Structures are given as C-alpha cells and as structure tokens.
C-alpha cells in the first residue's frame, strides 16, 4: 500500500473475555493489510458475572500476543452498583496504562477508540496531554435514531463527557447510518461522520452446500434475554404465527432464559412447545443452526447494526426484523422490516416469510452481506479514513 505503516493503537471500551471480539477482528484485518496495530485493553470484570474468578487474573499491566496482535492488558474489578465511581476508576486506570504503554512502545500515530463510553473519552484526555489524534468507532445502539428503550437516553452527567469525546475526535465512525444524526448532534456538528460496518467472518459464515429439506419452517434467532431484544414481542408474534401455520418452529440461542421475567412470558406463550433453546453456542454452533434454519428473526428495540443479522445473511438466510436494523443491511431483496414493539406486524412479516421464502435469492443475500462486512472491505475503508488523518 502507498501510505507508510502507521503505529495505530486500538483502545476498546470493553474487551475479551467479556465481548469486544469486533476489535480483534478489525485489528487482524488491518494487520493483514500491513498496518502496525496494537490493542490496549483495560477490562472491567463484574463480580456479579465472574465472582471469585476475578481474583485469579493478573493485577498489573502486562503484554502478550493474542491471535497475532500485540495486546497490552489490565484487569479491573468493578464495584457493584457504582456506575460513576467505576467510570472514574476505569478512565484513571486507562490513562496510567497508556503512559505505561508509551514508555515501552513509544507514542502511537493514531488512537482508534471503540465507543465513546468510555474509550473515546479517555482518548480525548490523552489527546489533551500528548497531542495524539484519535477517532471513534461507535457501536452502541443507544445512539440509533430508531432505537426505542428507556435505557437509550444518556444520563445527565454523561452528556458533557460524550460531547467532549465526540467533538475532539478527528472522525466518528458509526457502525451504521442510523447512528449518524445522534453522533453529529453530540459532537456539535463539528466532527466528520463516516459509517463503516463491523466485520463478519464471511468466509466462515458461508452458505451450506445444501439446506436440509424439512416440512417444518424454522426461524432462528441468536440473542440472550434482555429487554432490548424484545422477546415479549417475539413470543406474542410467534403465537400468532403458529395459530395460522402450525408447522413452524423457533430456535433461540443465547442465555438468560431462566430469568423469572422470561419464564413468565413463556408460560403465557401457547406455542412454547415449538420453541427450542440451545443455550450459549460458539460460532460453529451458530453457523450450524443458521444452516438448518429457513429464516432469521430479530424483534429488537435497540440495535446499532446487528452482527447476528449480518452473520445470518452471510449464510444466505433472509431476515425478518424490526426497523432498528439499518436500511442498508436489510433491503426488500434480503428480508422484511417492521416497526418496533408491534407483535402483529412482526407476525404478519413472519407469515409472509413462510409463504414467500423461495422468492429470496440466497446468492444475492450473501453478496449484500459481503459488500458490507467482509474483513477486506472493512479494513480498506478504515485505511482510507486513516489516510485522511495521517501524513
């Protein structure tokens, strides 16, 4: 490539083992394009989720190579029910970790923060001290213009911090066009906004050699139980579908379904015997279920983009989803979209999918997903953005 290989430091707001695999995917794709890339990960460990396991991980700063990427780590133990205290602790610790990093590796040419909350804010403070430019890839569905949840509105104390993060960045990179308006507003319309998708391993999430013939139409979804995923709407819609199409089933991957709130929903679902729960699956298990399904369904109230939808499309599956999924992802050629929180319209779209599944071209759906999220495509778009910032 024409540009010199810059020193790029990826700064995630959250990271493995607690999510954030998209950061590693980007880093690998960029490294494959010749970019000098490293990851600085300050991982906050929740006691409620990990318990005593939090005590078994290292306490200091340390470095190692992970999946071929130089990765510089630190683990923090979260204080339960102390959001503001945890914010201050995480930012202060990240700044110390960054000073430790540059003492051994030198200053990066550019910091690529993932989410303003709070890597983007930390990057703004680093810029003030070290004059290092940064950009932010924003993943959070709370910034989508179509997301509908009481949890999507930033708290009063968070707004000036978000404004600082967004307004001082060189470029903002939302993972879909639905985040553009809100990010632009929070930046005071000062910062250029350029959407770039997250990466999907489109070689792995590929179409099957042949889909298994079945007389039962299977919808698959892959999201753990959460209010944002609107399982109350999905179960009501599925009841309506089964009242008209008895030979339909629903397979759900993820966790949290023993939650009493979900169990109460399930008790009121007449079609519950036609629902299967797989539990958490690795990506091989997800792919196998995608290969066995006839369509993917997503009832979400909040999404920034939905990697699950893009993975499904990469295997050739058409999609039934709500309008929180961007228009550039699910088009009339790849699926049906309905309003949020509308079980009746979701059921109608699912019934149309059962009837019209054969009118969707798996090959066209795969091409759509690849053009948006293939690693080479995303990496090249990011490199073009880097060129706008670096000499």
Image (cartoon, rainbow, N blue to C red):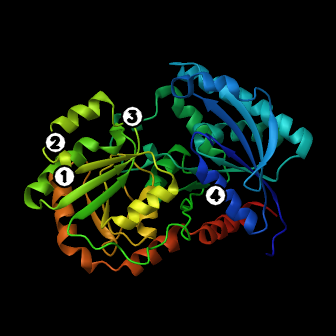
Going from the N terminus, do you reach mark 3 or mark 1 first?
3
**Residue 257 higher or lower than 203, as above or below:** above
62 to the left or right of 376: right
Q: CA distance from mark 3 to mark 4?
A: 28 Å
Identify residue for label 1. 238
Marks 4,1: beta carbons within 8 A:
no
Which label belongs to residue 17?
Answer: none
Q: Tell us which disc is closer to us: 2 or 4.
A: 2
Q: Are marks 1 and 2 in contact (CB under 8 Å)?
A: yes
Pointer 2 residue: 269
Classify mark 3: helix, strand or loop.
helix
Q: Is residue 295 left or right of residue 289?
A: left
Percent x, y for residue 258? 33, 33
Structural crowding at the residue carrying mark 3, measured as other residues with C-alpha within 10 Å and reported as few (<14), some (14–19) or many (≥20):
few
Q: Which is more N-terminal, label 4 or label 3?
A: 4
Sequence-wise, the earlier of marks 2 and 3 is 3
Q: CA distance from mark 3 to mark 1?
A: 26 Å
Residue displayed at 81% across by 41% down: 63
Identify the secondary structure beneath mark 2.
Answer: loop
């Amino acid at each position: 490539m024409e540009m010199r290989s810059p020193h790029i430091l990826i700064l995630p707001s959250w990271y493995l083992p607690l999510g954030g695999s998209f950061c590693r995917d980007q880093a690998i794709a960029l490294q494959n394009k010749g970019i000098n890339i490293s990851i600085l990960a300050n991982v906050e460990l929740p006691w409620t989720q990990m318990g005593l396991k939090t005590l078994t991980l290292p306490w200091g700063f340390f470095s190692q190579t992970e999946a071929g990427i130089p990765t510089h780590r630190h683990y923090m133990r979260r204080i339960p029910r102390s959001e503001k205290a945890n914010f201050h602790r995480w930012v202060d610790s990240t700044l110390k970790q960054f000073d430790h990093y540059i003492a051994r590796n030198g200053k990066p040419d550019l910091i690529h923060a993932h989410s303003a909350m709070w890597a983007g804010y930390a990057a703004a403070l680093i810029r003030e001290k070290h004059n290092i430019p940064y950009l932010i890839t924003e993943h959070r569905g709370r910034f989508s213009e179509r997301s509908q949840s009481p949890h999507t509105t930033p708290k009063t104390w968070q707004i000036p911090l978000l404004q600082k993060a967004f307004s001082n960045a060189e470029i903002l990179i939302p993972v879909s066009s639905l985040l553009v308006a809100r990010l632009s507003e929070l930046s005071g319309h000062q910062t250029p906004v350029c959407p770039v998708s997250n990466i999907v391993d489109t070689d792995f999430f590929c179409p099957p050699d042949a889909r298994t013939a079945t007389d039962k139409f299977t919808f698959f979804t892959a999201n753990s139980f959460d209010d944002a995923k609107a399982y109350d709407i999905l179960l009501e819609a599925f009841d309506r579908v089964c009242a008209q199409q008895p030979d339909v089933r629903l397979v759900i991957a993820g966790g949290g379904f023993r939650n009493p709130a979900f169990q109460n929903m399930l008790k009121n679902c007449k079609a519950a015997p036609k629902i299967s729960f797989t539990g958490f699956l690795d990506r091989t298990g997800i792919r196998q279920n995608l290969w066995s399904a006839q369509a993917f369904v997503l009832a979400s109230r909040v999404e920034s983009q939905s990697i699950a939808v893009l993975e499904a499309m990469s295997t050739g599956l058409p999609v039934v989803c709500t309008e929180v999924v961007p228009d550039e992802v699910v088009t009339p050629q790849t699926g049906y979209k309905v309003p949020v929180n509308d079980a009746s319209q979701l059921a109608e779209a699912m019934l149309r999918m059962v009837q019209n599944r054969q009118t969707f071209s798996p090959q066209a759906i795969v091409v759509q997903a690849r053009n948006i999220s293939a690693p080479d495509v995303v990496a090249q778009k990011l490199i073009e953005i880097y060129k706008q910032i670096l000499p």
